[in-house]
Amino acid sequence: MLARLASRCALSLIAATTFSSLAPAAADEDFAVASYLRAHCQDCHTGDTAEHGVRLDNLSAQADDPAEFRRWERVLKQLRRGAMPPKDAPQPPRAATTATVAQITTLLDAASARRRAEGRAVLRRLNRVEYENTVRDLFAVDVRVKEILPEDTIAHGFDNVGAALNISPVLMERYLEAADVVISAASVAVPPSQVPPGRGQPIAVRKQESYSLLESLPSWFLPSVYPRDKSVVLFQPDSSATALDKFRAPAPGLYRFKIHASAYQSKTSLPMLVLAGSFRSVSGSAEQLGYFDVPPGKPSTIEVEARLHARGETIKIVPADLLKVYLKRDIMPTYLGPGLEIHSVEVDGPLPEVSPPAAFQQLFGGVDPTKGTLADAEVILRRLLPRAFRRPTTDEDLAPLLKLVEAELAAGRTFETALRGGIKGVLCSPHFLYFRERPGPLDDHALATRLSYFFWSTAPDAELTRLADAGKLHEPAVLRTQAERLLADPRAAAFTANFTGQWLSLRDIDSNMPDAQLYPEYDELLKWSMVEETRAFFNELLHHDLSLLNFLDSDFAMINARLARHYGIDGVEGVAIRKVPLRPEHHRGGILTHASVLKVTANGTTTSPIVRGVWVLDRILGEPPSPPPPNVPAVEPDIRGATTIREQLTKHRATAACASCHKYIDPPGYALENYDVIGGRRDHYRALGVKPVAVTGLEPSVLKILQKPRWGHGLAVDAGDTLADGRSFADVEEFKQLLLAYPERFAENLARKLVIYATGQGVEYGDEAEIARLVEQSKRSGYGLKSLVLEITSSELFRNK
C-alpha cells in the first residue's frame, strides 16, 4: 500500500512539473493529462514492472528528445485507436480522452515542427550496393567491391536509411581498399584478352576448341556420370560435367561457350544450370550464368557468354531437377530414369574487345598516362567530379584533390600513382559518399539523385543530369515522365530486387537449409524459382499497374515447371517464369502463399506461428509487436512430432503477460500453418520415426535405387484461429478475405514501406497527412501499384528533404 501511494505521489509530482510547460493551455487543462494518466494508465504502466515495459510515470514534456517523442507518439497512437485503456478496464469519459489527445497532439506538433525545420531526412550515405553500382557506372568497370565493405545496418526494415548509415574508421579503410580495386580496373590500358601470359605486346588472340568430355574422364569416373560412345550422361542433380576442367581460361576475358546437349530418357525438356568460376576448391566462388531448358531428341545448342575474371577459370554444367539416385557403373546402362546428356562443348575466346577498354578511355580520355602532367590531372578530375558528386562542381571542389596529385608528383611519384591519390580522394569524399540534400524543396540535382537511387540504385544518367542542369526536372510533368522512363528501363530490376529483398525478406532465402531428411525434395532450382516467382509477381503488378491488393490474394501466379510441381499445378513446362491462372484447389494466390515468403519465415525444420505472425504484422499490416519481455523463455518446437505447436502456444498464452501480445501475433501465423518450411501445402506435419510415405509412379528399376523418403505424416494441422478483433477464420483463404475487408490498411503499410525506401528516412510523426493522401489517391486509381509508386515520386515527402 505504501509503495502504491508513493508511486501515485511520484506520478503526481512528475506530472505537475512535466505538464506545466505545455503552453498555452490553461492550468486545469495541463493537469488533465496527468490526471488522465494517473487515473487510467498508472496501475499497469508504472515502475520497473510496467506492462510490456512501457512506463508512463516518468514521461517528460521534453519532446525534442527523440526517445521521449517516440514514447508520447506511442501513447497518442493507442489513445486514438481506442486500444488503451483495455476494453475490460474502466473506460474514461470521452471528453477526457479527447482533451488528452488534443494536448499530446499540441506537444508533438510543436516538437515536430522544430525538428522538421532541418528537413525530415537525415544525412544519408551510399549503402554498399549503391556504392558498387555507382563506381561501376562511373568508371565503366565490372568490379565486385560490395563484399569488401561491411554490411550496412538495417533501420525501419531497409539498409538505405540515413539514420543507420554511419561511417567508422574501419569503413573508411575499406573505402580506400575498394577505391584501389576500382582504379586498378579502370587503368588497364589494353584488354586482358590481348595480353598473352608473360608478354606485354598487345596482340590479337582468338582460339576455338571443341572439348570431348570423354577424353579426360578418369577410369574410376564419378557415380551417376555415365560415359557413352560420344557423350556423357549426368543422372543426378549434384553430378556435373567435371571434364570441363580440361579447359582453363588462358587469360581473363570474355568467352563464348556452345553446349551441345539433350534430355536423355525423358519425354520433356530438362533444366540445366551453367556456372562460371574457378572450381578448384569447395570454397571457390561461382557466378550463375542461368538455367536453360534442354529438350529431348537431337542435341540442342545452348550458347552462353561468360566473363572469366582470372586465368584458370572455367564453366561448370550441372543438371537440375533430376531424381536423387546414386548409380554405380554396372547399373547405369540399364537405368531407365532421366538424365542430362552432354555431347560436346565449344569454347571461343578470349573474344576481341575494344582497345583501349571503355573504362580506360572514360577515365583518361586522350591523356597518355605514361606522360601525364598536373594539367592533365586537372582535365581528368574536372571531367570526373560532376559525375562523381552528382552535381555541378567548382574550383573549390577541385582544389584539394589537385593538391593531392601535385604533392605526389613533387615527391617523385609517377603520374598514374599521383592521379590514383586524387581519384581516391574523390571516392572517399563526403560529396561522393553522401547524398547532398538541403532543407526545404530538393534542388534539381538532389531530386535527380533521389529518383535514380530509388529505381536504379545508382547515380543519375545523362538525361536526368541534363534536365537537372537545365533546371527542369522539378517541373511536375517532367518529373513524372522521367519516373516512368526509369521504371521502364531494365535497370529498374534493382528496385524490384532491393525493395522486395528487404520488404519481403527475400535476401534471407539462404539463412537456413531445410532438413534433408524431412524435405529431401528441396534443391537449388526450387530455391531459385522461389525468389524469381516473387520478383516476377512484383514486376507483373508494377509494370501492368495491377491492384496492390493482389499481394494479399490473386487469381494468378508467376511460376515455372519446378514451382508448378511443388504447388501441385499441372500443365506448366520449362524453367522460364510465366503467368499461370489459379483455381481454388491450388490454395495459392498472393504473396502469403509464395514459397519464398514461407521459407524465410521458417527455420528449415519447423514452422512457428510466432515467427510468421510477427512477420505478417510487420511486413503486411505495418504493426510490428513489441519485443518480448525479458526472461520469457522461447517456445521450442517438439521436433519429435508428439505435440503440436498449437498445444505448446496455448500453454504459453495462459500467462497474462504473454497473452496480451500473442492474441495479435499468433492468429496470422496459424493461418499459414498449412504450409511447411519450403512452402509446400500440407494437412499433416512431417515427422521422423513414423511410417515413411510411399513413392509411386516411377519405373521399378528407378524405384529400386531411388533414395527413399524417411519422413511420414505426423499430427494433423489446424490452421484456424480468431483475430484480436473477434473475427474468425478456418484457413488461409478465409484469413486473406479478412485482410481484404480493410484494403486501406495494407495500402497504407505498403505506401509507408515505399516512402521509407524511396527517401532513406522512416515515416514519422508529421508525415501522416501525406501518407493518407497517397492512400486515398491510390484508392481512387484502383490501388494500382505503378500509380502508387509514381505518386510517391510526386509527393511532398519525396520532393523535400
Image: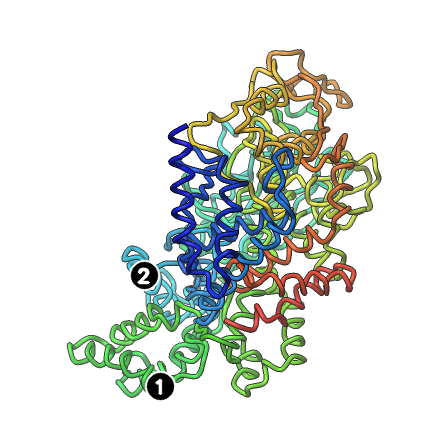
Q: Quadrant of residue 516?
A: top right
Q: Residue at x 75, y 41 (%)?
A: 736
Query: Residue 751: image x %, image y %?
Result: 64, 58
Q: Is residue 328 visible?
A: no
Q: Position of residue 231 (x, y in %)?
A: 63, 39
| Observer able to see residue 186 | yes
| Towards the viewer: 770 or 267 | 770
Task: Please tell me how crowded label 2 is: few (under 14), some (14-19), or many (20+) other residues with Cα within 10 Å.
Answer: few
Q: How is the image coloured?
A: rainbow
Camera-side mark, 1 or 2: 1
Q: Earlier in the sequence, mark 1 or mark 2?
A: 2
- How far apart marks 1 and 2 lie (CA) works out to 34 Å
Residue 400, placed above or below residue 170: below
Amino acid type, residue under disc 2 in the picture: Gly
Name the amino acid type tagged 1: Val
Does residue 233 appear to the left or right of 8 in the view shown? right
Numbered disc total:
2
SS of the residue under disc 2 = loop
The secondary element bearing badge 1 is classed as helix
Q: Which residue is mark 2?
A: 198
Between 19 and 350, the one nearer to me in the picture: 19
In screen coordinates, is 540 left or right of 148?
right
Q: Which residue is mark 1?
A: 379
Q: Where is residue 532 drawn, in percent x and y?
A: 64, 48
Q: Which image quadrant: the N terminus?
A: top left
Determine the residue positioned at 63% across, 72% down.
794
Q: Position of residue 210 (x, y in %)?
A: 56, 51
